[in-house]
Image: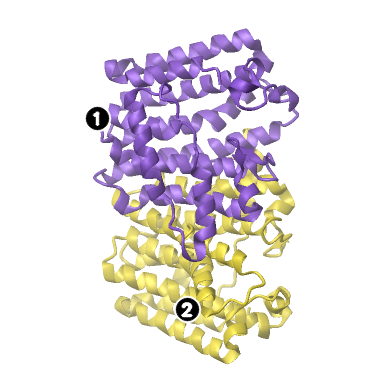
Chain colours: A yellow, B purple
Amino acid sequence: MNNTFYTPQMQAHFTHFEAALPGYMPATGGLQTVVAEAMAYACEAGGKRIRPVLTMEFCRLCGGDPEAALPFAAAIEMIHSYSLVHDDLPCMDNSPLRRGRPSTHAVYGETMALLAGDGLLNLAFETMLRPDVRRDVPADRVLGAASALADAAGIEGMVGGQVIDLNSEGQAIGLPVLEALQQGKTAALLIAACVMGARLAGATPEQEEAARAYGENIGLSFQMVDDILDVTATAEALGKPTGSDAENEKVTYVSLLGLEETRRLAAQRTQQALDALAIFGEEAESLRCLAQTLLERDH
Amino acid sequence: MNNTFYTPQMQAHFTHFEAALPGYMPATGGLQTVVAEAMAYACEAGGKRIRPVLTMEFCRLCGGDPEAALPFAAAIEMIHSYSLVHDDLPCMDNSPLRRGRPSTHAVYGETMALLAGDGLLNLAFETMLRPDVRRDVPADRVLGAASALADAAGIEGMVGGQVIDLNSEGQAIGLPVLEALQQGKTAALLIAACVMGARLAGATPEQEEAARAYGENIGLSFQMVDDILDVTATAEALGKPTGSDAENEKVTYVSLLGLEETRRLAAQRTQQALDALAIFGEEAESLRCLAQTLLERDH
């Protein structure tokens, strides 16, 4: 983990989260050892943990205890991870690698990966709803947060984005369909990460709307930067082959709008994310840094 | 639907549920039409809807409004249905048929069936947690009910049962492993169906324990009767080939214990289910009939 990516505030959330996550994983031993290991494997080495860190930071920013957000931070990471496991399956992207390691089905087999993915999606809700992990968060806030994640992960959100992606393969889709795809595949969970944190803290409607707008704008900006880097970055900086979108004939922001216009839109989205933070004043500095860092990254 | 299977009370729940279920399915039209259709297809023609009917009846029995239980009844049917969709996939049982119709992946393709299953599991939680479907059920009861279903559907319950099943293929497992398998694959969701209804009504701990015991005992009895019928029934009565367990070298209660001992245990489990209902007095007559009917069925 590169220490310059996050402010010390965010880095503290990250460190806290990494220490807590294994405690939310199912116990190994007994008849469920292999599937429990597959589930843990899928959640390991998870990179920057942006979604969990956002949940904890928005909870803090809206006056809550970031530690009370940990089960929800774990839940959103489980859902993100399950989506990668199922996405890599032979009947989906058929990808043998994920983040430089063998994908879950490459290690545990296709059937176990399917069940581990199902188990992780389910575990996200077990973790959020189980009374012993709810600390002192009132029941209506737990419901509000869990509901935000459920809505974001389903057919109107992440699963919906994957369906659009699947149906768009090899098709000359336009900007409206690309936006719908990325709203689902990328923005929905980032929005939920921010909104969950806000709801857990009992945020005002204005604070919650700011959280939503921040999540949406960094989400779409993030995807645009991804599309730009696939064209402009060196494979060395990216840690994976570049030009893969063009090779796969994938419609991207760059293929539809060109590099310059995509750069302009990414900067505009980032500015909208920064604007949304205005109501939080100086307390939102860490989130401003993150938005800027995500825009300026070279990998 | 055979009208003699349920008492009029239970038949009313069934009718009510069938009328309400389509309203909980995702809208078609737009980019999600095909996946929405696949999700609805998987939940159609669902047979007796025992789990939803149990949720509604236990809610009524513990003093609640069975109509308030409808979103939870829909949720448990969605989870039951998703498990069948994923179970039928080529990498699992590779089954082209389900309930006499082509299985979901046979109609919609493997990838869409995978995503429809993911979408249904997720939709179960969307449906339970969404504020606009909660009617007047207090937030802590919603959490209690949703948590019961989450726990039952995951690695400690239904998914866990499928993992044991997968790992047991072609193995000479003994009774303890078979019981763990059936607790997960069959009993867990039936227990959750009963406990959810009780929790939604604000049941006492004694009522909730009775609901749990009833669900567990009819669940295990149900599986024993299934195993018996696979050996003794005619294919005509069963509507599917008999002897499939032996052909697949599947370990069952009958293969481990013999017909007579399995019959004795099934009757014993049914009696324990009936005993659990004692605290409800005459009001539990419909549930007594159901337990007896499930034991005495010939298909």
Dot 2 amino acid type:
Ala
Report the quarter where the C terminus of chain B lies.
top right
Mark 1 belongs to which subunit? Answer: B
Q: Residues within 10 Å of mark 2 (few under 14, many from 20)?
A: many
| Quadrant housing residue A86 | bottom right
| Quadrant housing residue A237 | bottom right
Q: Position of residue A128 (x, y in %)?
A: 42, 49
Tag on residue A291?
A: 2
Indicate the secondary structure of the residue bearing disc 1: loop
| Residue displayed at 29% across by 35% down | B66
Q: Is residue A208 above or below residue B162?
A: below
Dot 1 amino acid type:
Gly
Q: Is residue B225 above or below residue A168?
A: above
| Residue displayed at 53% across by 79% down | A175
Nearer the viewer's eye, disc 2 or disc 1? 1
Indicate the secondary structure of the residue bearing disc 2: helix
| Residue displayed at 57% across by 63% down | A162
Q: Which of B41 and B225 is in front in this view?
A: B41
Report the quarter where the N terminus of chain B lies.
top left
Tag on residue B63?
A: 1
Q: Where is residue B298 in the image (x, y as percent from the top left)?
A: 55, 17
Tell me if residue B204 can be seen: no
Left or right placement of residue A90 versus residue A22 in this view = right
Gap in Å between the C-alphas at discs 2 and 1? 52 Å
Q: Do the residues labelled 2 and 1 touch (CB within 8 Å)?
A: no
Q: Position of residue A286 (x, y in %)?
A: 43, 75
Q: In this view, does A85 lie above or below B204?
A: below
Q: Where is residue B109 in the image (x, y as percent from the top left)?
A: 65, 53
Mark 2 belongs to which subunit? Answer: A
